[in-house]
Image: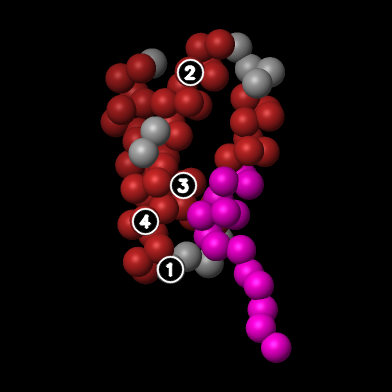
Amino acid sequence: MGRNTPSIKTIVYKYVNRLSKIVEILPQEERIIFTNYLNDLETTISICSHIGVDDPLEILFIHLLRRMKDLHRTW
């Protein structure tokens, strides 16, 4: 009997989709920041998949840390 568990990438993108619904109602300036934040998320997912994660939100947090310098420039 096998188990079907969604990949971490699938789960992360479910969070992103949920957050995107919130972002739609934000001011345009904030939407742009969020869109910029998501750039290169694939790389962070790949990096995290090598060590494994317990919570998909860890990936979004690590990605935020990676992107902070770039996001700071847009503010």
Tag 1: residue type? Gly
- Whether 5 is drawn above or below 26: the answer is below
Marks 2 and 4, the one that precedes in the sequence: 2
Residue 32 is labelled as 2
Q: Are marks 2 and 4 in contact (CB under 8 Å)?
A: no
Per the image, the residue denoted by label 4 is 46
Image location (x, y in percent) of residue 59: 46, 52
Q: Secondary structure at mark 1?
A: loop
The stretch of residues the image draws in magenta is: 1-15
In percent of the image, x 63 and y 17: which residue is there? 26
The residue lying at 63 percent from left, 69 percent from top is 5
Who comes first in sequence, dot 3 or dot 1? 1
The alpha-carbon separation of the residues under discs 2 and 3 comes to: 18 Å
Up-down relation of residue 24 to residue 53 (above or below)? above
Mark 3 and mark 1: Cα distance apart in space: 14 Å
Q: Amino acid at mark 3?
A: Phe
